[in-house]
Image: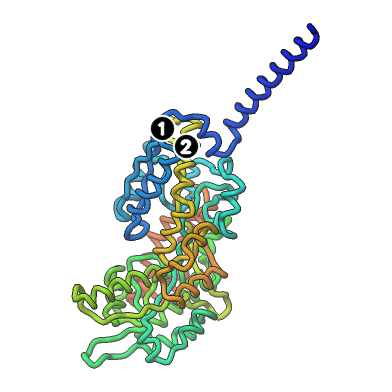
Amino acid sequence: MKVSKLLAMTVALSLVFVSACSKKEGGANAPAGEAAKDDKKPDTVRVWAYPVHGDYEKDIKELIADFNKQYPHIKVEYEVLSWAEGPKKFDIALNAGDPPDLYYHAVSGHYVNTGLAIQLDQFLTPEIKDDYLPGMLDLGKIQGKQYGLPLTAGQWNWGGNKRILEEAGVDWKKIQEKGWTWSEFSDIAKKMTKKLPDGSMQYGLATDGTSLDFSQLIAQNAGLVDVLDEKGKFIWNDDKILDSLKFIDGLMKDGVMPKETGGLNPQQRTQMFYDSKAAVISKALPYYDTIIANRNKDIDAGKVKGEKIEFVLLPVPHHENAPGKTYVMGEGYVMFKQKNDKGEQHAKNAFLVMEALSGAKAGNSSNELNLPFVRNSQAKMYEGKGKAQKYNWEAAQNFMKSTTRSVESNLDVDKSTKLKQFQEQVQKPAIQALFAGEKTPEKIAEEFKTKGKQMFGQ
């Protein structure tokens, strides 16, 4: 009997010990959802977002309300920032060591180098990983480690006016399927450049002189991933960049683009397209399909004057000796800790909110923006509810077969900073000078080599 009692006590103590160890290990390694259920202490998670689409604030309210049904002890404080002022506000908070727990943005090597961005691999369950479509989680990685949960896979494309394209005999469906080379685009653009009956000009292409995206997209479609490659090596110093500059210069000399391009801002560029003064616009996101459809409704209602436009999503033309590439930028939530770290449980709670803002129902963002979904659950929930024209939706899907992305996620903070300096101090004024005819492609290419060597030591 005594032996039996002793054995029973030993077994009981062993079970208590194993249980205690299991709970301890579960706190550190269990999925965020499981761990959070063990701790119901009130907590507050701060979220800074942007107006991802027109009704995104409505989305975020509904997602938080759904989340609080399951986790009422976690209060979510959110703020929707403006695209113009938000980045500056976040940079100030980050530099002060007090960023929000969750911030809507693409991942950045700069964030990681601050030591405040939280690596997410420890929180990702097999179910979450399997829900993401192939390659989509990679959009939130830096050097192979997960720092963001992508909500959208934004595309940078070009767009065309269907009426003008068809009047010029352009097989735009073939272009959506097969792409087009620089020479093919140039020939087509010349046909669409003409003087209209009222004396005004219709141009083959409209862009602006204040943004960097035009020259970047051209260079990417010449085989140059960026100013730097993934290893941080300066690569805008060979014949590919010269070819890119010559292509742009040729469009200006042929009158395909207005001579005042260097002085146009993005709003003026877009207005030219709305006014049917430009057959093709760069850049044009798939969301333009919705924007222009809404504008057409306003024209029918008498709220806006102008011609209704049928929008065609187009790929960026590519060099004859390089494949066409679609620039894709994954945007979603990145998680941060603060200088006064709030602890492990708070991080787990923040991830719960992060997943709630990125799950199946959150796929409405991609649906509104006419973008391919990033998760299987999102595609299933919004199947048949798309707002894009069928031909544009299929084109956006097709463009995802050959993509390129920013190299910033692979750069250290020093290279990332110098890259931005090169873009603003060298690239932007050089392209504006090219638009204005003040510098030749050859001279600019030499400047790029010289400045690149000075700034990057290569």
Q: What element carries label 1?
A: strand
Of 98 and 53, the residue lying toward us: 53
Q: Is mark 2 on a helix, strand or loop?
A: helix
Of 137 and 363, the residue lying toward us: 363
Quarter assignment of residue 444 = bottom left
Q: In this view, does 176 lie above or below 14?
A: below
- Type of residue at label 1? Asp
Hey, which residue is sitting farthest front in the picture?
1
Give x and y (percent) for residue 311.
37, 78
- Please give the residue where the numbered disc 1 appears in the rendered image: 43
Query: The N terminus appears in which quarter of the rendering?
Result: top right
- At label 1, counting other C-alpha atoms closer than 10 Å, the crowd grade (few under 14, some 14-19, many 20 or more) is some
Tag 1–tag 2 contact (CB < 8 Å)? yes
> Which residue is at a point 21% across and 90% down the rendered structure image?
198
Give x and y (percent) for residue 182.
49, 81
- Type of residue at label 2? Asn
Give x and y (percent) for residue 30.
59, 36
Q: Is residue 198 above or below residue 275?
A: below
- At label 2, counting other C-alpha atoms closer than 10 Å, the crowd grade (few under 14, some 14-19, many 20 or more) is many
Disc marking residue 349: 2
> Which residue is at a point 46% across and 47% down the rendered structure image?
356
Q: In this view, does 21 lie to the left or right of 227?
A: right
Q: Is residue 300 left or right of residue 220?
A: left
Of 358 and 271, the residue lying toward us: 358
Q: Is residue 453 visible?
A: no
